[in-house]
Image (cartoon, rainbow, N blue to C red):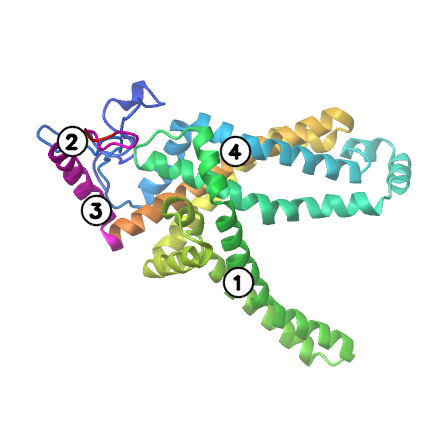
Amino acid sequence: MGGQPPWETPGQGADPSGAPGESGWGSAPSAGAPPATPGVAAPALRPLDLGDVLDGMFRLLVRHWRTYALALGVVVVPVNLVVVYLQRQANAGLGILDAFRDPVGAQAALAANRNLALAVAALAGPFVVGVFVTPFVSGVTAAIAAQGYLGERPEPGPVLRRTGERYWALLGASLLGPTLLAAVALVPGVLLIAVGIAGGPAPGPIVAGVIAFFLGLVVALVVRFLFVFFPAVVVVERTGPVVALRRSARMVRSRFWALLGTLILALIVGAIVGFVIALPLTVPGGLFSGTVGYVLAAVGTIVATLATTPLFTNAVVLTYFDTRIRTEGFDLDRLARSVEAPRAADAAGGDLSPGGRAG
């Protein structure tokens, strides 16, 4: 779509952080336009095309990089330091170069380092992070992106507190939706394969199980995509997990193919960016042993996570608001509030802004 991108107002380029109260989206208010709601930004919202979404997911990250880095770093840095440490220790702290220099010594070190508890911890670490930490990280990123989109100025402390208040709803939606339903979709195929293997050489049950498994995988991916908006719904609309999942599915179904194409492309772009950022650090980290290898691998993982997580979630939040504008008139609702609130404030003869008091 032509015209000014909705995430940058004229004259914003001089101050990437934005001034307090400045709208981060839409064009500047024209002469005679109604004043914004006291304490609430009133950006000029409009439907977004593919280029708007891909451009906006980078612009939001650049504009609010400090908030993303601090708010996500509180979680991402310690978690990745622990996970990378466990994985390195499970490999006896060896690097690839050690295996080339002294294959026999490397094999002996691995044999001497066999520790079931450490191996389980190294394997379970990413799983635990995915189940319990990822919902919080998604909520934090969605909250920052939503506030940036609506012209507000997100700060790390309030974002973390707000997301913390919604953690159980985020976790519940994550477990109830994508995790459990995907598992249910895959269970029939796994059971058929197991029955076929236990029943002997007859290939019928095994083939049926493989087909059922891949069909279940398709169902699981579709279910996962239907629930892609749930972090934004939970933190923006402050709903419970069940309501968030239902609302996400309803919104995605209304524009399924357009959203699927847009978000797949955003995911690919984010993955390429993460790969390019992480490669110079993670490859040397895998080559070297000891502290040097650990530090390089950990830093590469952390930097890539801090870059790629906001990018894709920004795209999700942008398409979430775009869907609300197209199907619910969200832009008209915001405009109506910006018109009515000042009139109500004038009628009351006082300040109706958040934290203000009429009088």
Q: CA distance from mark 3 to mark 2?
A: 15 Å
Query: What residue does disc 3 label?
Result: 333
Indicate which disc, 4 or 1, sits on the residue closer to the N terminus: 4
Indicate which disc, 3 or 4, sits on the residue closer to the N terminus: 4
Badge 4: residue crowd in 10 Å (few <14, some 14–19, many ≥20): many
Q: Amino acid at mark 1?
A: Ala
Query: What residue does disc 1 label?
Result: 220
Q: Secondary structure at mark 1?
A: helix
Badge 1: residue crowd in 10 Å (few <14, some 14–19, many ≥20): many
Indicate which disc, 4 or 2, sits on the residue closer to the N terminus: 2
Q: CA distance from mark 1 to mark 2?
A: 47 Å
Residue 128 image label: none
Q: Secondary structure at mark 3?
A: helix
**In the rendered structure, which segment of residues is drawn in magenta?**
327-356
Residue pictured at 38% horizontal, 33% vertical? 60
**Outermost residue toward the left in this view:** 32
Indicate which disc, 3 or 2, sits on the residue closer to the N terminus: 2
Residue 72 image label: 4
Q: CA distance from mark 3 to mark 1?
A: 35 Å
Pick the front one: 100 or 226 = 226
Contact between marks 3 and 4 (CB within 8 A): the answer is: no
Quarter-wise, where is residue 110 in the image?
A: top right
Q: Position of residue 170 (x, y in %)?
A: 49, 49
Q: Give the vertical position of 235 relative to 71 (above or below).
A: below
Q: Quadrant of the C terminus?
A: top left
Indicate which disc, 3 or 1, sits on the residue closer to the N terminus: 1
Q: Is residue 335 magenta?
A: yes
Query: What residue does disc 2 label?
Result: 35
Q: Amino acid at mark 4?
A: Leu
Q: Quadrant of the N terminus?
A: top left
Q: CA distance from mark 3 to mark 4?
A: 31 Å
Badge 3: residue crowd in 10 Å (few <14, some 14–19, many ≥20): few
